Image: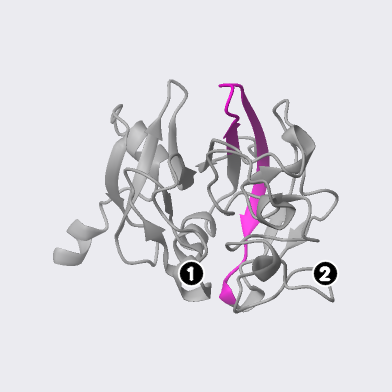
Amino acid sequence: MEAAQTQRLPVDCQQLFLEGERSSGVFQIQPPGAQPFKVHCDMTAEGGWTVIQRRVDGSVDFDQLWEAYKNGFGDLNGDFWLGLEKIHCIVQNKRYNLLIELEDWEGEKQLIQFLFNLGEENTAYTLSLLGPVSGELENAVGDFRQLPFSTRDQDHDLKADTNCAKHLSGGWWFSSCGHANLNGKYFRSIPRQRHERKQGIFWKTWKGRYYPLKSTTMKIQPTELEAES
């Protein structure tokens, strides 16, 4: 009986939304085959999004090692990274959309959406972009359809002679070091030193390589795009 009761937890924030929840906040979920864990749900008019990353005030240091990025860190009500293993557990049973929302210091916002998948740890949590892309923001991840995750202590990026996570800051799906890093250092103003500037939170195709963004949010939701067969 105990196990049956536990399994009634929602598998993600969209299920919570379908069950009638309309308030954003922290909730407990349990994807199939995983232990329960807490997530931040962003409830919109269209449905429930499970937030996997948020940067709003620089209160959390994102220059962390592999284990931290695997398990998650930060404050679910503030700045946090949910954890690669948790994200993988959520998305492995269905197709999901990844929505990235960015904001600059002038209050302008941009977003981009992918159909995506995330491999397990033995693939270095490879991010697969399955398309299609929507939103006004140009894709800074380029033509790379599959990108493994890298941290300072586990270098899986596509740049042979450089450890991008060490060269920049934080952990990310780096191709070469210059396209995007939403887990870089949080700067409230642009640092004077070039070597510092490149360590910030950036999305090259929007504000350029050396513009540290004010806020970022990454969230996921099951896609309804699959045709019924």
Q: Counting residues from the N terminus, which is met first, the one under dot 2 or under dot 1?
A: 1
Looking at the rendered image, the disc whose residue lies closer to the viewer, 2 or 1, is 2
Counting from the top left corner in percent of width and height, residue 78 is at 36, 44
Counting from the top left corner in percent of width and height, residue 4 is at 21, 60
Q: What residue type is labelled 2?
A: Lys
What residue is rendered at 44% in x and 61% in y? 86
Counting from the top left corner in percent of width and height, residue 153 is at 59, 79
Question: Is 107 inside the magenta-drawn segment?
Answer: yes
The quarter in which the C terminus is drawn is top right
121 w.r.t. 111: above or below: below
The quadrant in which residue 173 appears is: bottom right
| Kind of element beneath mark 1 | helix
Q: Give the range drawn in magenta.
A: 100-121
The residue that mark 1 highlights is 70
Colouring mode (rainbow / by chain / secondary structure / one colour):
one colour
The residue that mark 2 highlights is 159
Is 132 displayed left or right of 90 in the figure? Answer: right
The quadrant in which residue 169 appears is: bottom right
